[in-house]
Image (tube, helix red, strand yellow):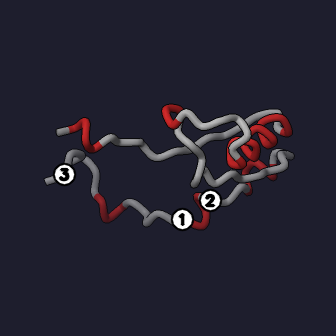
Amino acid sequence: MTDTPNTDDALLPAIDRDRLSSPRILRRLGAEVRFLNPSGLPLVDDSVNATHPRLRELRDLVAWCEGMVWSSPERVNLSAAT
């Protein structure tokens, strides 16, 4: 049993990960696209100093851009869930 019994999973196309990560639409609209992989970015509560290299990289990109599109998985604290 699924939580969406009114849909037929067989009719849904498989996820094409290459198309999802492609900046084609933004480029067609005239945007210059740059990506930042957030791996290694300190979290807000890590009390890291502002000279951290990953923070500097993020700040440089923010200063360069005129707009941003963010996508992120949900962050779950498993220790708090118990």
Judged from the image, the secondary structure of the residue bearing numbered disc 2 is loop
The residue where tag 1 is placed is: 17
Q: Nearer the viewer, residue 50 or 8?
A: 50
Q: Residue at x 35, y 42 (%)?
A: 76
Place of residue 48 in the rendered image (x, y in percent of width and height, measured from the top left): 60, 37
Q: Classify 10 Å Cα crowding around label 2: few (below 14), some (14-19), many (20 and above).
A: few
Judged from the image, the secondary structure of the residue bearing numbered disc 1 is helix
Closer to the N terminus: mark 2 or mark 3? Answer: 3
Locate the C terminus by quadrant.
top left
Q: Residue at x 46, y 46 (%)?
A: 73
Answer above or below: position of 54 versus 43: below
Residue 61, disc:
none
Picture quadrant of residue 66: top right
Label 1, label 3: how many angstroms apart (C-alpha)? 23 Å
Q: Amino acid at mark 3?
A: Thr
Judged from the image, the secondary structure of the residue bearing numbered disc 3 is loop
Q: Residue at x 32, y 40 (%)?
A: 77
Place of residue 37 in the rendered image (x, y in percent of width and height, measured from the top left): 63, 54
The residue where tag 2 is placed is: 21
Residues at circles 1 and 3 in contact by the CB criterion of under 8 Å: no
Picture quadrant of residue 58: top right
Answer above or below: position of 38 versus 82: below
Q: Classify 10 Å Cα crowding around label 1: few (below 14), some (14-19), many (20 and above).
A: few
Residue 2, disc:
3
Q: Amino acid at mark 2?
A: Ser
Label 2, label 3: how many angstroms apart (C-alpha)? 28 Å
Residues at circles 1 and 2 in contact by the CB criterion of under 8 Å: yes
Place of residue 81 in the rendered image (x, y in percent of width and height, measured from the top left): 22, 38
Q: Residue at x 41, y 42 (%)?
A: 75
